[in-house]
Image: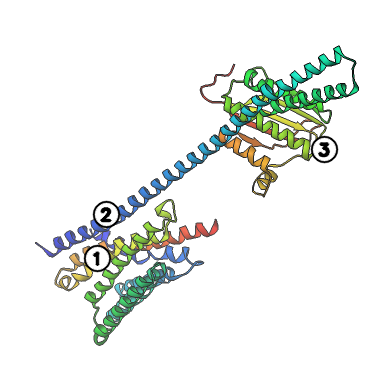
Amino acid sequence: MSLLSLVIIGVLTMLCLAVALILFVVLYQRKVINHEQQLKELNRRKQEELIQAAIRSEEEERMRIAADLHDDVGATLSSIRLMLHQVARTQTPDSAVHTVQSLLDDTIQKVRNLSHQLQPGTLQYLGLTKALQSLSELLNRTGHIKVHFSAIDGWPPLPTESELALYRIVQELLNNILKHTTATQVHISTSIEQGAACIRILHDGPGLTEQMYQDMLYKKGAIGLKNIESRLKSVKASLSFPPTDHAGFASQMLLCLPIPQTVVTV
Amino acid sequence: MNWWISLSTVLSEFSALPAIWLGRKQRGLLWYYAWASFLADFYSALQKWQWIPRSSAATVTNLFLLTELGLVGFYFLREMSSRVLKWLVGLAMLALACYFLIDAAPVFGTEIRWQDASLFYFLYMLLCTIAFVKVLRNIEHKKIEHSPLFVFSAGFLLYVAVTLLLFLFQPQFRHASAEVRWSIWSVHNVLNLLKNLSIAYVFLIQKKVSLK
């Protein structure tokens, strides 16, 4: 065998070995990264499941308390009220009886409101738009703020968990408007935008910007906003703060949920 | 065939220029190594064109081999995380450099100690393998081609694996014809080009990282 062919064989062998080693490193690193990504994905899913489980258990607890309040405490109070009414009719009306009666009326109303807040029956039986309308009317009755609600006709039927999450988010956002702003007018509307079911909240008070919202999420406290963020993540919805061009409204919040493929819009 | 050999030789001689240009702001051991490669290759080109006498070829090559050991060895040493390994490699480098100097001293200006140099190249192969282990242990980049240590080690390993063999066969090449010798060295030229381009790519990705 000539020197040249010997060297060529040697060079090729060394090259093959070096290339094999490099290929091994590349493939092994890719395998490790894939494995790590799978673990991360698994972790993310687990976290999502945990959030959903926490929200579900919270809702179940709320439902149980709401049912207890409505069926047990509410019913008992109503019976007492009826009995007092009976006493007031048959015997000489005493001012104390009237006072107790009025107190009971007040308490029954409070229990009803509390029960409604914990588990809105309207949402369960009539859907999100009716529940939002009912929430707006409830807020209007307080006299502190004027809430106007308008809904589109073709609002898609969404999964119960998604509707409940959207309702709770809107509830929290309205609560924040009442607590932290000087707004006197609120306008809530529903729409379908780019394949997503959206709820737009406009108000005339000073509002949040995207940056402020993100900053507040990482601050201590702000439990309401953190709950909003958890709920958004759990149903894969988004909340944005676009600038408003509606006259008379200084701030705008846009809550959007991509319509699931299984849901057919009307 | 001749044009291929000439082309690979010219490309190889100037292949360190992109690395020198791209690394001019970052500098570091690899940048100085690119300079050393360029100067050694340019010197051999000047000799080939007979602009300077061939008598100093051995001195330049011996000096380059020692410089390469220092720069590349310290580059890998700096990248190692194990203190024991650092000590072992440091001692091996010192021992090899001392052995090379003692062995080559009487003929430093007239002869190139190819067999001694092949020991350096064997050490480089080990260092590249250790570098690969480090890359796999501490995955810092999602894409391996973004890891400067991996890119340099891969390019350098290909160059070293073949050059080691050429150094070992060097005494036999003396009896071969000039055409055979040039054909064999053209393979070295291609891999030298690849090695220098891998250094240039290292500077390119480091630049991107620093810009981010």
Residue at x 69%, y 31% (from the top left corner): A170
If the image is split into quadrants, where does the C terminus of chain A sit? top right
In this rendering, would B194 be left or right of A215? left
Q: Chain of mark 3?
A: A
**Label 1 secondary element:** helix
Mark 1 and mark 2: Cα distance apart in space? 23 Å
Mark seen at residue A20: 2
**Residue A32 position (above or below residue A235):** below
Label 1: which residue? B185
Asked whether A72 or B119 is in front, the reply is: A72
Amino acid type assigned to the residue bearing label 3 in the image: Thr
Q: Chain of mark 1?
A: B
Considering only order in the chain, which callout, 3 or 2, is on the residue closer to the N terminus?
A: 2
**Label 3 secondary element:** loop
Amino acid type assigned to the residue bearing label 2 in the image: Ala
Asked whether the beta carbons under mark 1 and mark 2 sit within 8 Å of each other, the answer is no
Q: Of all residues shown, which one is farthest toward the left? A: A1
Number of other residues with Cα within 10 Å of mark 2, as a class: few under 14, some 14 to 19, many 20 or more:
few
**Label 2 secondary element:** helix
Mark seen at residue A182: 3
